[in-house]
Amino acid sequence: MKKVLSIVLSLVMLLSAGMATMSAFAATVGSYESTTKPFDNKIITRVNGKDSNDIDYEKDDDKRQIKFTYTGDGKVTGWEFEGMTEGVDYEIVERGDNYIIIHILEDYDGDVIANAIVEEPTSETTTVPESTTAATTKKNEDQKSPATGASVAAGIAAMGAGAAILAALKRKNDAE
């Protein structure tokens, strides 16, 4: 009986330690939330290469994300980030008709110059096919950290229970 109980306790403790380890790795590896260095560099906004106040921005320093929104007249046809390379200095998190959200990568420490390429409105009215006016918003779901709190709590509880049973058995053996 003692051997069976010892084997069961060993398996419970091994499983608990494994769950706690996996949860710790899942919470930190590849997660924006693990970024520790905030981004507080200068942000410059431009429209068609000229300094402009027609772009609002919101910073999330913890995630090093910046949302740029064009508020002027005209249609945004693209965004440029002068002096920065996509995939090296920043990644696009989400893009819409008049906004873009970028994530500044950890190694980049320069200023951000956001340039909205805008097609100025004309006095003529043109009809655009419905298929080209559909929203182009794509949310990058890969950047979300997994929910790991439940398995961590279960792992810690199982390890505590295993340790308590092991201590009780040791005391019982010492008393005999």
Image (cartoon, helix red, strand yellow):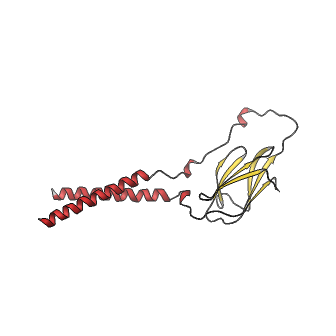
Taking the spot 62% from the left edge, 65% from the top edge, the residue there is 107
Which quarter of the figure has residue 19?
bottom left
Residue 123 x %, y %: 88, 37
Residue projecting furthest to the right: 123
Front-most of 56 and 18?
56
Picture layout, residue 127 above or below residue 2: above
Image-based side of 75 in relation to 104, left or right: right
Taking the spot 32% from the left edge, 58% from the top edge, the residue there is 159
**Viewport quadrant of the C terminus:** bottom left
Front-most of 170 and 20?
170
Residue 81 x %, y %: 73, 57
Image-based side of 103 in relation to 76, left or right: left
**Viewport quadrant of the N terminus:** bottom left
Front-most of 145 and 90?
145
Front-most of 52 and 95?
52
- How many badges with numbers are in the image? 0
Residue 5 x %, y %: 20, 56
Picture layout, residue 5 above or below residue 118: below
Residue 91 x %, y %: 64, 55
Picture layout, residue 125 above or below residue 84: above
Image-based side of 129 in relation to 106, left or right: right
Taking the spot 80% from the left edge, 47% from the top edge, the residue there is 118
